Image: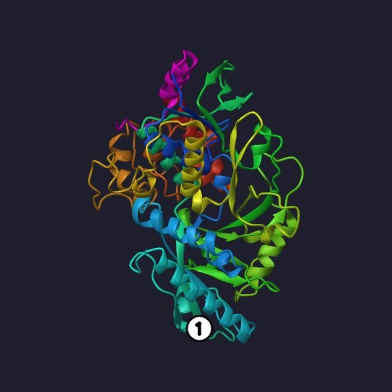
């Protein structure tokens, strides 16, 4: 049965009350990142009664700190991990052609052929791009969705990346990968699609005392607490997984990105891809993004010790990223050009050896002594496959009576074939609105009750007032931070954040 996918404070209160009164539950999923969201959607579409509980907000942790890429697995092929490379290419194709064509689009990746790049390095990149083309074909993704790689001229390189170093420039190599308009927006779309299929979505709800068939939920806003009985409890809390099952051993690694105004890179239309000196298979990417920004990333540094709610970039990582990208630029970028920065922790499985950059990105499903099923490791691109794996495992172990997995061909909220896409896209819609919401863009304006819904929330920011209202009325935003830092990504730049905080407060007050 298809339900209304709108998430808001009223729905949250009603669903918390129903659970406290003993509403029956098949599966409780702990964690509201992309993995937990994917599990909730898989369970709901299999006909199971599922509750997702997130201590903070949707995409609060690692799932909002990625490179916004849906990787095809080329890097893993180069290291001999054919299985994860093939799965990644398949999952990328599923997202781009069926699940979320409105959120994942082809991104050109440009490797400039500079004088400093030796013949062996050029051959390795060409071979890698060719292997990427083979992976794309094996995954069944058409070239109309992801174009083939090619050699391009010096003039084409400069057109795509205007600030590239020009002395000794001998053209470039161009390939394509999947790019998310935003990772937190993908999480919201998956969760709302789960709600559309009957899932209960509870943000600001902490889970504790978890066992194989029960968990205690605490409303972080009211302080009220109650126990929920379920047939399976699944821990999908990423780098915090050991808080639920202390026997788990993770090895977090920190990935840092810097944020620039796109003008610092000459408003590029391709991701400038720069080999890291001394590394055969690692690159730094300067990627054009929404809101007129470029994100530069990424690092892979050991991050031992307690897991912070919001990881922070280090000065060494900032210097590393700047030094690396400057090897490919005609003008030098410095710390003064950086307008924002963020860091996320990868939930890698602890193998006990090697650099974190070399640790496998495979996932694992582990049962604790108490019976909780934990999914650890993995990567954003494979979230759907991970969800299918853990639900299949839960079905075998707990006989849940679930139907087969349906998510491979399931359009998310905002995709053209989703049942919620009832209004036609028209030419008068803001292009940025369509980029973020896809076929749901007309609904955002149609649902608006605020004054001046089509006006920007601040001068020079292409987010309109109707989007802030929609974040509260349909996307489960309960706080200023939810609106500014996750439903939109305005908050990545402190100066922009300060200009819109009062507007966000206005919409939260109107919803009370």
Q: Is residue 219 visible?
A: no
| Image color mode | rainbow
Q: Is residue 455 left or right of residue 78?
A: left
Task: Give the number of marks.
Answer: 1
Whether 204 is drawn above or below 171: the answer is above
Q: Nearer the viewer, residue 265 or 176?
A: 176
Residue 113 makes an appearance in the image: yes
Magenta segment includes 7:
yes
For image coordinates 49% across by 58% down, the residue present is 88
User: How many residues crowd mark 1 within 10 Å: few (<14), some (14–19), many (20+)?
Assistant: many
Q: From this viewpoint, which residue is outermost toward the top?
A: 21
Q: Which residues are magenta?
A: 1-23
Q: Which quadrant of the figure has residue 2?
A: top left
Residue at 46 percent across and 64 percent down: it is 177
Where in the figure is residue 250, as x and y percent of width and height? 69, 45
Q: Quadrant of residue 276?
A: bottom right
> In which image quadrant can residue 125 be found?
bottom right
Q: Secondary structure at mark 1?
A: loop
Q: In x, y percent, where is residue 60?
A: 57, 39
Give 424 or 54, whichever is nearer the viewer. 54
Q: Position of residue 154 (x, y in %)?
A: 48, 83
* Residue beneath disc 1: 171
Q: Residue at x 33, y 48 (%)?
A: 415
Q: Quadrant of the N terminus?
A: top left
Which image quarter holds the C terminus? top left
Residue occupying the point 41% across, 42% down: 189
Asked whether 8 falls inside the magenta stretch, the response is yes
For residue 411, side relative to residue 203 (left or right): left
């Amino acid at each position: 049965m298809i339900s209304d996918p709108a998430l808001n404070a009223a729905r949250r209160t009603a669903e918390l009350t129903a659970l406290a009164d003993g509403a029956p539950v098949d599966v409780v999923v702990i964690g509201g990142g992309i993995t937990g969201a994917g599990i909730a959607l898989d369970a709901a579409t299999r006909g199971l009664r599922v509750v997702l509980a997130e201590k903070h907000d949707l995409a609060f942790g690692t799932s909002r700190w990625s490179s916004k890429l849906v990787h095809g697995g080329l890097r893993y092929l180069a290291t001999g991990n054919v299985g994860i490379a093939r799965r990644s290419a398949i999952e990328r194709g599923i997202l781009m052609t069926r699940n979320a064509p409105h959120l994942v689009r082809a991104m050109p990746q440009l490797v400039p052929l500079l004088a400093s790049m030796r013949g062996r390095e050029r051959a390795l990149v060409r071979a890698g791009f060719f292997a990427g083309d083979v992976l794309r074909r094996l995954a069944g993704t058409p070239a109309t969705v992801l174009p083939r790689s090619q050699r391009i001229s010096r003039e084409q390189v400069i057109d795509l990346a205007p600030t590239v170093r020009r002395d000794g420039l001998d053209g470039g190599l161009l390939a394509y990968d999947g790019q998310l308009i935003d990772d937190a927006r993908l999480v919201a779309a998956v969760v709302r699609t789960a709600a559309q299929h009957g899932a209960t979505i509870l943000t600001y709800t902490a889970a504790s005392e978890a066992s194989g068939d029960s968990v205690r939920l605490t409303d972080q806003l009211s302080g009220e607490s109650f126990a929920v009985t379920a047939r399976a409890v699944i821990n999908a809390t990423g780098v915090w997984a050991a808080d639920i099952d202390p026997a788990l051993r993770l090895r977090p690694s920190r990935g840092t990105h810097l944020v620039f105004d796109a003008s610092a890179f000459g408003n590029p239309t391709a991701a400038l891809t720069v080999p890291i000196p001394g590394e055969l298979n690692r690159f730094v990417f300067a990627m054009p993004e929404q809101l007129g920004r470029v994100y530069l990333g990424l690092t892979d540094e050991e991050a031992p010790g307690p897991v912070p709610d919001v990881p922070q970039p280090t000065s060494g990582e900032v210097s590393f990223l700047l030094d690396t990208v400057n090897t490919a630029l005609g003008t030098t970028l410095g710390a003064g050009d950086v307008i924002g920065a963020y860091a996320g922790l990868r939930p890698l499985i602890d193998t006990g050896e090697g650099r974190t950059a070399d640790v496998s990105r495979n996932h694992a499903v582990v049962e604790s002594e108490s019976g909780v099923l934990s999914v650890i490791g993995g990567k954003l691109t494979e979230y759907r496959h991970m969800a299918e794996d853990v639900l299949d495992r839960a079905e075998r172990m707990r006989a849940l009576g679930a139907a087969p997995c349906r998510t491979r061909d399931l359009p998310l909220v905002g995709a053209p074939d989703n049942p919620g896409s009832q209004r036609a896209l028209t030419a008068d819609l803001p292009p940025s609105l369509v980029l973020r919401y896809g076929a749901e863009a007309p609904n955002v304006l149609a649902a608006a009750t605020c004054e001046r819904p089509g006006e920007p929330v601040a001068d020079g920011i292409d987010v309109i007032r109707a989007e802030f209202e929609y974040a509260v009325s349909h996307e489960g935003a309960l706080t200023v931070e939810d609106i500014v830092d996750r439903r939109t990504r305005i908050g990545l730049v402190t100066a922009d954040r300060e200009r819109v905080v009062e507007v966000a407060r206005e919409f939260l007050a109107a919803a009370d």
